[in-house]
Image (spheres, helix red, strand yellow):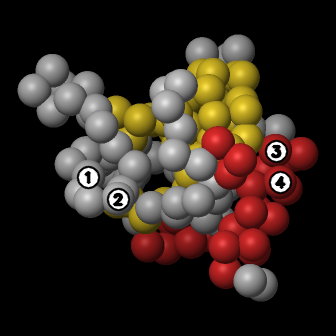
Amino acid sequence: MIKIEQGDIIYIDAEPHSGKETGGHDLRSGNIRRPLVVLSTTGYNELTGLVTGMFISTSSKLKFPQMCIPIIDVKGGIHGNILTWSLPNFDYESRHAKVISKVNEKTLTNLLQQVKNIYNL
């Protein structure tokens, strides 16, 4: 079992999606892996085998651009926008998660504040 920590950037098999969920990768071409910033705590991840986080999109056609945080991660080869309006939950083992990098503390703090805003905490 892999260890996934809060703040990790992972690739995860995120398809299929449905309705208003964020998605759009092509299942036929096998393009189902998406980068996700993990926001759930390491303890939660270990206890449940699940991760909660926010996707990173490279699309130039964003639904809510005012609710995005730009990211460039040279180590992980990730660039785009963190989509702060959605908090999907995934079984990271069955969806073949792989840790590729980690966000800095400032970005993590900003994302956790976005979570508080979603739930009015």
Q: Nearer the viewer, mark 3 or mark 2?
A: 2
Q: Residues within 10 Å of mark 1 (few under 14, many from 20)?
A: few
Distance Cα–Cα, label 3 vs label 1: 26 Å
* Three-letter residue code for mark 4: Asn
| Contact check, label 3 and label 2, Cβ < 8 Å | no
Q: Nearer the viewer, mark 2 or mark 4?
A: 2
Distance Cα–Cα, label 2 vs label 4: 24 Å
Distance Cα–Cα, label 4 vs label 3: 5 Å
Q: Quadrant of residue 91?
A: bottom left
Q: Which residue is mark 2?
A: 20
Classify 41 as above or below 30. below
Residue 81's spot in the image, x, y percent?
Answer: 63, 34
Q: Secondary structure at mark 3?
A: helix
Q: Secondary structure at mark 1?
A: loop
Distance Cα–Cα, label 3 vs label 2: 26 Å
Please tell me which residue lies in front, 85 or 49. 85
Residue that appears at 63% across and 22% down: 79
Residue that appears at 81% across and 44% down: 107
Q: Secondary structure at mark 4?
A: helix
Q: Which residue is mark 1?
A: 17
* Three-letter residue code for mark 2: Lys
**Which one is earlier in the sequence, the residue at label 3 or at label 2?**
2
Residue that appears at 52% across and 63% down: 87
Q: Nearer the viewer, mark 3 or mark 1?
A: 1
**Which one is earlier in the sequence, the residue at label 3 or at label 1?**
1
Q: Which residue is mark 4?
A: 110
Distance Cα–Cα, label 2 vs label 1: 8 Å
Residue that appears at 46% across and 46% down: 2
Q: Is residue 74 visible?
A: yes
Q: Which residue is mark 3?
A: 107
